[in-house]
Amino acid sequence: MINLLFPLLTKDIPKAMSDEDIVKEYLSTQNVAYFDVLYKRYSGKIFGKCISLLKDEEDAEDSVQEIFMKILLNMSKFSGKSRFSTWIYSITYNYCIDRIRRKKKDPSLLVEDLSNHDVPEDVDDVFLLEMEIGRLKVVLDEIPTKDRSILLMKYQDEMSIKEIGHLLDKSESAIKMKIKRAKQKFKKVYSEIYKEAV
């Protein structure tokens, strides 16, 4: 048990300590130094995700604080079935999508796109991975939020199909189809903006 007269300081926590171990220590001691370590590790990443989804810096800053409040209040619910980073991403993603829905900035998030049941032609990953970063950002900003989100999960956050499925509560085959459709939309928008054969 930690002596309350000499509380643990963030600098006293080993840098190599895993997120999961830090969560366990925080839950058993309630020492805020452990939570502070998690905040320092993830606040920048969460801000980046919020900016990519909400498209507003002030909104993203407010969201980071609210998301960390949710993380703090729900820490005991972290089961360890997925990586801690995946669990945090799930909270971030769901919070941002709810915020967008409330503001009705993107009505396409409210209903599943059922207009096209055809299996889209697969777009080679190389097309996305080797694209110049400036163009990549431009195109990502132009595609619907749900498509941008799933592409960022797969290619930026390097989440597995299984992790994305768990996050979105969808089967692995449904996630594969969503990624295919998102890549197809990305390619279509790219060719419209840059008027190039792709």
Image: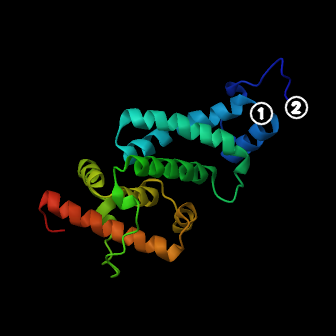
User: Which residue is the extreme one toward the top?
Assistant: 5
> On the image, which quarter does residue 11 sit in?
top right
Density class for disc 2 (Cα within 10 Å; few <14, some 14-19, many ≥20) is few
* In front: label 1 or label 2: 1
Query: Secondary structure beneath disc 1?
Result: loop
Q: Would you name the residue on which mark 2 appears?
A: 1
Horizontal and vertical percent for residue 9? 71, 24
Q: Amino acid type of disc 2?
A: Met
As rendered, which of 50 and 1 lies closer to the eye? 50
Query: Secondary structure beneath disc 2?
Result: loop
Taking the spot 34% from the left edge, 43% from the top edge, the residue there is: 55
Question: Where does the N terminus fall, quadrant-wise?
Answer: top right
Q: Is residue 18 visible?
A: no
In the rendered view, would you say 73 is above or below 12?
Answer: below
Q: Would you name the residue on which mark 1 appears?
A: 30
Question: Where does the C terminus fall, quadrant-wise?
Answer: bottom left
Query: Disc 1 or 2, which lies upstream in sequence?
Result: 2
Q: Is residue 69 visible?
A: yes
Q: For this view, does 99 lie left or right of residue 170?
A: left
Horizontal and vertical percent for residue 81? 69, 60
Colour scheme employed for the rendering of this structure? rainbow
The numbered disc on residue 150 is none
